Amino acid sequence: MTRIEFLGTGTSHGVPVIGCHCPVCSSADPHDKRWRSSVLIERDGTTVVIDTGYEFRLQALRAGIDRLDAVLYTHQHSDHLMGLDDLRVFTSEEKLPVYGLGPVLDSISRIFPYAFDDMPYKGVPRLAKRPVEERVPFRVGSLEFTAIPVMHGCMRIAGYRFGRAAYITDASDILLDENRKALEGIHTLVIGALRDKPHWSHFTFDQAVEAAKAIGAEEVWFTHINHATSHAEIERRYAPYARPAYDTLVLEVDDER
């Protein structure tokens, strides 16, 4: 079994949004408190995080993360990246491998050059770029991943498949024609669903459900949710097929395909 823990399920602003007093930002429901989107994936002693947003330090403390084998990046937008410096606690002995599409890793290394240079100062993360190819499996310990290219507006970024699960956030097009074979047999799909109102670079809830059905996913969890809709309302409208993930939610996914 593969364990998936949602470290964060919010969009770039997080929820509550600074200075906002809307019903969701003012909600007392803990499910409506959404840190920036990220997940922890564990299987047979291998521990991997996908994306390190602004709250990564707090997420790691809350989840009790004390070791990492790798970090996978979907893309270089700040809400998925800016916790990178806190990876230094995992790199005291050797460099931590970070995986992603080549252009994504190139952008990240330009933003954080000191993390990838062999500089003598010890108070920095020591990271090693591991470029991956689209739809070509790669291994991190006991986990096998495949980078699934998707469109985020005009950007070509990566989602990741692992076993019978896939994590696709910040998507506006899953490029089904070219990804169909790579997405065959997906049981559990985590997919970004921003809100009801159409957005040029993110799926709405309805669009995310349509994409999930096109893939053939049997279990669907929304992530990267903004403050326009409460957890309870999303649950009421889309369960049982699709449900809103929430921070600290843990899923156990059967690895058999």
Image (cartoon, rainbow, N blue to C red):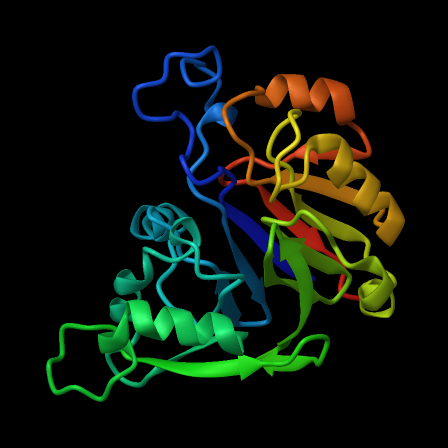
Taking the spot 68% from the left edge, 65% from the top edge, the residue there is: 149
Is residue 206 found left or right of 97 in the rendered image?
Answer: right
Is residue 22 found left or right of 5 in the rendered image?
Answer: left
Q: How many marks?
A: 0
Front-lying residue, 192 or 45: 192
Quadrant holding the C terminus = bottom right
Where 57 sits versus 120, above or below? above
Taking the spot 52% from the left edge, 78% from the top edge, the residue there is: 102
Front-lying residue, 71 or 47: 71
Extreme-left residue of the structure: 121
The answer, for residue 69, to whether it is visible in the render is no
The spot of residue 228 in percent (x, y) is: 54, 21
Where 97 sits versus 50, above or below? below
The answer, for residue 111, to whether it is visible in the render is yes
The spot of residue 151 in percent (x, y) is: 66, 56
Quadrant holding the N terminus = bottom right
Front-lying residue, 145 or 81: 81
Where 75 sits versus 62, above or below? below
Is residue 204 found left or right of 113 in the rendered image?
Answer: right
Taking the spot 81% from the left edge, 69% from the top edge, the residue there is: 182
Taking the spot 69% from the left edge, 66% from the top edge, the residue there is: 148
The spot of residue 233 in percent (x, y) is: 65, 17
Q: Residue 193 appears in which quarter of the rendering?
A: top right
The spot of residue 219 in percent (x, y) is: 79, 44
